[in-house]
Structures are given as C-alpha cells and as structure tokens.
Image (tube, grey):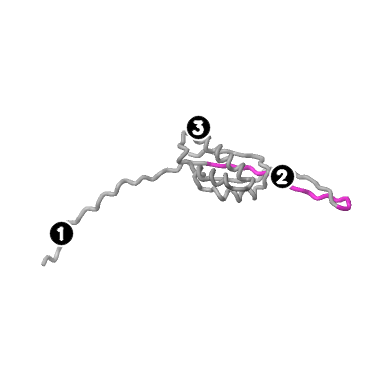
Amino acid sequence: MEARAVEKFIRISPRKVKYVADLVRNKSVEEAVEILSLTPRRAAVALKKAIQSAAANAVENHKMKEENLYISRIMINEGPTLKRFIPRARGRADRILKRTSHIFVYVSERVSLHRKPESKPKEVSKSGAKGKS
C-alpha cells in the first residue's frame, strides 16, 4: 500500500526540482529528510515538506510504521507557466517564462524478509556406499 502527498504550483522550474529528487529516490524517509536538510538548493525545502507530509499520511491514514517507510516513487511534473514581458531596446519586449512544478511523493512500507533458519543438510550414511574395500 502506498501513501502520497502532493505539492502543487511550486515556483521552481521542474528541471531544478528533478536534480534534487534524484538525490533521495528509493531512500528511506529518515535518510531522505537528513539529505534534504543539508542540501543547499531551494527545491530541497519543498521536497522535504512533501516527503514529511507523505510519511505523516502513511502513519495516520494507513497505520504504517514510520521506521519502515521508504520513498517508492517521486514524480515532478510541469505546472502552468507564468508569462511575463520585459522591455528591451527600440520598443521591443522579450518574454520571460516563470515555470512552476507539481511534486508527487509516494511512500511505501519496506517489507523485511526474515529468513527461516536453514535446516542442516541430512548426512548420507556411508553403509550404503558401493565398492567397499
């Protein structure tokens, strides 16, 4: 089961957010929050908020253990672009594109694979061996 959180209309280019998202993809939630706390990019703040929100949703709504949570998927999509104009020489104008992002974070509970203790292999009796000398 997955829990998710969505941050929409973040005023950062999706390309810039994807660089930070690649740092924490498939990491545990605790490890991801620590990495993002030390990352000096503006996108790290929004991504950290989304991860903490997804973890809280998993604990509260789906009764998952916070210690076992990991980031199963992160998707960064492009939101609407704000178009602005700046005056240039000779009466012209240049367009400035202010891009926005949508961040989708999915967390899942990591299943620990506990192995059963292996049974000792049965010893083959030597009495049935051929070619006695």
Residue 60, numbered label: 3
Judged by depth in the image, the label closer to the viewer, 3 or 1, is: 3
Task: Tell me which segment is drawn in magenta.
Answer: 89-106
The residue at which mark 1 appears reads as: 126
Mark with earlier residue (3, 1): 3
Q: Is residue 10 above or below residue 88?
A: above
Near-viewer residue (29 or 126): 29
| Vertical relation: 29 (above or below) 88 | above
Q: Residue furthest top?
A: 60
Which residue sits at x=32%, y=46%? 116
Q: What residue would you read off at disc 2?
A: 81
- The quadrant the C terminus occupies is bottom left
Q: Earlier in the sequence, mark 3 or mark 2?
A: 3
Amino acid at circle 2: Thr
Contact check, label 2 and label 1, Cβ < 8 Å: no
Percent across and percent down for residue 79 are: 67, 43
Q: CA distance from mark 3 to mark 2?
A: 34 Å
Q: What is the secondary structure assignment of the residue under circle 2?
A: loop
Distance from the alpha carbon under mark 3 to that under mark 1: 61 Å
Q: Is residue 100 left or right of residue 104?
A: right
Q: CA distance from mark 2 to mark 1?
A: 80 Å
Q: Nearer the viewer, mark 3 or mark 2?
A: 3
Count residues near mark 3 (Cα–Cα under 10 Å), then give few for <14, some for 14-19, many for 20+: few
Residue 124 x, y percent position in the rendering: 19, 56
